[in-house]
Amino acid sequence: MTTRAVLPLLLTATVVALAGCAREATPASQPGPGGTTTGPATSTTAGPTPTGTPTAAPTTPAAGTRCHTGDLAIRLVAGSPGAGQRYASIVLTNTTARTCTIYGYGGLVLLDPARHELPTRVLRDPTAPPRTVVLRSGQQAASQLHWTVVPDAHEPTTGPCEPTPAYLRVIPPDERTSLTTPWPYGPVCQHGKITQGAYRPGSGE
């Protein structure tokens, strides 16, 4: 065989050998650190959610569901007194046919018999923080009040410590108009200091 005939055969054998080496150098998978096997990256597309799978409910009420002052009726419910301590609950009832929500504390002011404002200092109870209360028709939400009949150093120790309220004006949470209910519990000492909890479901009893 001549040199010219041998040369093409050698070139063909070299190309075949290199192609085989290339295939061996790129396996489909190879051991990774710790004996695990890693392969080519793949993308996974999630399939459709099965019918009937529960989903998380929203944590905030839908817009426009707030209870407005005109939707609500008010009353006070007395709590159990302690040594110089007094308790009552503001109870709001949904008087409409629609479902509405209450969230927060609202406002309140003590009033004299002529419905003039009396000294009132409202503190929010951190142990009863706000949460959304859903009120269907006829359901109720209550906010607990706590005050004292023990005068402080700047109040009289004989006779009433403060003027005796006749009414309580209550502004529901996020509203501007108020509801008024009789206040039968006597003076609120320490300059009308009342600690109020956020509204909770129930009648306050």
Image (cartoon, helix red, strand yellow):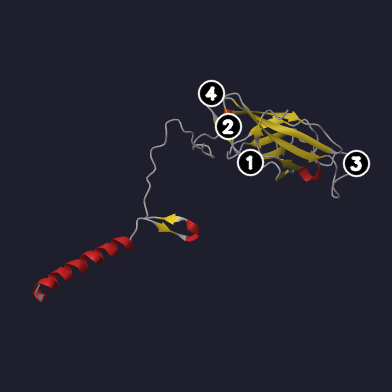
Marks 3 and 2, how far apart in space?
A: 45 Å
Marks 4 and 2, how far apart in space?
A: 13 Å
63 w.r.t. 8: above or below: above
Q: Position of residue 10 (x, y in %)?
A: 17, 70
Marks 1 and 4, how far apart in space?
A: 25 Å
Q: Farthest bottom residue?
A: 3
Q: Residue at x 48, y 61 (%)?
A: 33
Q: Which labelled disc corresponds to residue 158? A: 3
Q: Is residue 32 left or right of residue 156?
A: left
Q: Which labelled disc corresponds to residue 97? A: 4
Residue flagged by tag 3: what amino acid is it?
Answer: Thr
Q: Which labelled disc corresponds to residue 68? A: none
Q: Position of residue 41 (x, y in %)?
A: 37, 55
**In front of the other: 60 or 111:** 60
Residue flagged by tag 2: what amino acid is it?
Answer: Val
Marks 2 and 1, how far apart in space?
A: 13 Å
Kind of element beneath mark 4:
loop
Closer to viewer: mark 1 or mark 4: 1
Tags 3 and 4 touching, CB below 8 Å:
no
Say which residue label 1 marks.
130
Near mark 1 (Cα within 10 A), the count class, few <14, some 14-19 or many ≥20, is some
Q: Is residue 16 left or right of residue 203?
A: left
Tags 4 and 2 touching, CB below 8 Å:
no
Q: Position of residue 49 (x, y in %)?
A: 41, 36
**In front of the other: 76 or 10:** 10
Residue flagged by tag 1: what amino acid is it?
Answer: Pro
